[in-house]
Amino acid sequence: MALAATKPKRNLPLFQTSGSIIMLLAVIAFFAVVAPGFFSLSNTTNIIRQGSILALAAFGQTFVILIGGTDLSIGAIMGLSTSVTAMLMLKGVDPVFAVLIALMIAAFCGMLNGIVVNVIGLDSFVATFGMWSMALGIALVVTEERTLYGFPGVLRVLHDGTVLGIPNPLILVLVICGILHFFLKRTATGTSIYAIGSNLEAARLSGIPVVLRKTLIYTFSSFMAGLAGILFLARSNSASAIDPIGYEFDSICAVVLGGTAMSGGRGGVKETLIGVTLIATLRNGMNVAGVNTYLQLVLLGVILILAFVGEKKKQSLYKRASSRPVTASGGTL
Amino acid sequence: MTTEMIPARKLEAEGGRRGWATMYRFITLLLFVALAVVFVPRFASQANLLNLTRNIFLLCLMGCGMALSMLIGGLDLSLGSVGALSSVLGATLIAGGHISLGVAVAIAVGAAIGFLNGFMISRFKLPDFIMTFSMMYIARGLALTYTQGQATYNLPRPFLWIGKGFVGPIPVPVIISLIVLLILFLALKYTTFGRGLYAVGANKKAALYSGISVPRKQIQAYTISGLLAAVVGLIYVARLNSANADLGQSWTMDAIAVCVIGGISFAGGEGNFLGLLMGGTVIGIIDNCINLLGVPSRFQDFFMGLVVVLTVTADHYAKKRQ
């Protein structure tokens, strides 16, 4: 981080952000031509509403990826918070309490993730994949493997409502994005997250409570997944444990396409917002153009792999530019 | 406790750890069997034991592919989806009467996808779990696109033999699984191919400097993993007499659980294929008891996740103590 003034490093994020913006514009232009009805006000609000769920989940994922981890449990945690909220509301619990309890459960799962990864020291994808399985299992038990519906529609205002013509979910996402951006870039705790991501040992030696911060980040990620689950519930007005499965995949796609480095320490929520817009636009465009849902999975998988190949290429370019050729060729293994 | 500690401490550090790990696993296994026999009704019935044996060996077979990828320090998350894709493709041909062609196509597809996984991981240095995670969705998406949600039924009788048949008193899947386990066990222990896999998993740089082609080993491991996923897929299709793109959603987690309990290390370069038998037995018994006790079937997901995290944690601490 201290070397941020050297030339290649300063140019890199700029290139990445503009790269994903160019990609976004290209995608929009492509679908505007190919799919009639794509470029309309109603469809745009639809994209925003779809994308806002992903945005919330991806913000949490961004934090985990910034510290060099991955959270594979996001989809299952969303399913869990959706199911718990629906189940509680069906039992007659006040919706506000139902939401709070669901969020607390989600955060608790995240805390377990954090403890298993940081205190015990397992790989993040092993621990979070285990949590994925556990949360899915509990959610399926809560919903009894059915789709729950018929609860009061109070939450729908979160998704359907507008303030001064602006959809509520957009306001929610922008406010949260603003707060998180400010937190990451302007507060000492926020910048310490970058420090942890770029060099864990250096961060620890400079007195940052690494284990605590990292555990809290996993907790936060699951909390955001819980929030995304609530918005998912508000959108579909029915709850099933399995429907949100797959958001972990979309969220990693969004974060990586936005330009946050998988190795940690580089990126942010602003970039993720662009990545989310890209994924949401792609998904929506493919829907409007009549590409079936199954094929969309295939395309997203290919895109994620390509994004990674691109990131690796860029890293090796950067390495070659910033270090002597001997270390670059010897150290790439 | 203390009487057991003394001989363990006397052993060399390495041997002691192995001894302890095996002992701990064996005790867990015995505990499971004892609990199951005492508390679960119908557990010890002949029909159930036959069913259990078949499941245990299928779990071992799933674990084989995963274990190979874990040995080189990777992870194959695409296992279930690859099994589904290759078997639905093969099933179309098989249902048309071309049994051997269908089986060959399924296995070739599985191996090809595995090869692609290995190639991308070694050539572009992608993180293993990202490549195979993407492949999990790609293969599932392709399988669903191909079948459009329709299952293929009424497969020819000779093919069903793979899943339902017997040789003498022994079910065919058990025999296939035993053969694969034996071949892999011997290959890993006594051939340069196998020693190379261990070397790559233990230390990539050291393996490279001692003249082992790391990319080639990675490609080999993932290709065999994909191939075995296709074999498991075919056996399941033959057993269910239907090929469906939804096949194998839980295989990845099951396979990881089998490997972890079987003593294959996530860090790579450590583990024994005979351990998979133990892993398969534990997971098979857990699954079986959950079914017999009438616990909601999807609660298995919860247990698998819990078992994986707990076992890896226990291993981690066992290593730390050394």
Image (cartoon, helix red, strand yellow):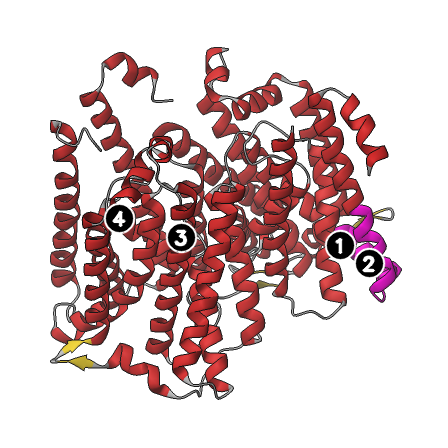
The chain containing the residue under callout 2 comes to B
C-alpha distance separating marks 1 and 3: 37 Å
Q: Is residue B100 visible?
A: no
- Of A254 and B24, nearer the camera is B24
Instruction: Give the residues in magenta.
Output: B29-54
- Check disc 3 and report the residue beneath it: A216
Closer to us: A125 or B225:
A125
Q: Are marks 1 and 2 in contact (CB under 8 Å)?
A: yes
The residue tagged 4 is A190
Marked residue chain, label 4: A
Q: Is residue B26 visible?
A: yes
Residue A31 position, x and y percent, is 16, 60
User: Do pointers 1 and 4 mark residues of a single chain?
Assistant: no
- Amino acid under label 3? Leu
Q: Is residue B3 above or below residue A147?
A: above
Q: Are discs 4 and 3 both within one chain?
A: yes
Say which amino acid is labelled 2: Ala
A95 sits left or right of B20 in the view: left
Instruction: Give the labeled residue for mark 2.
Output: B36
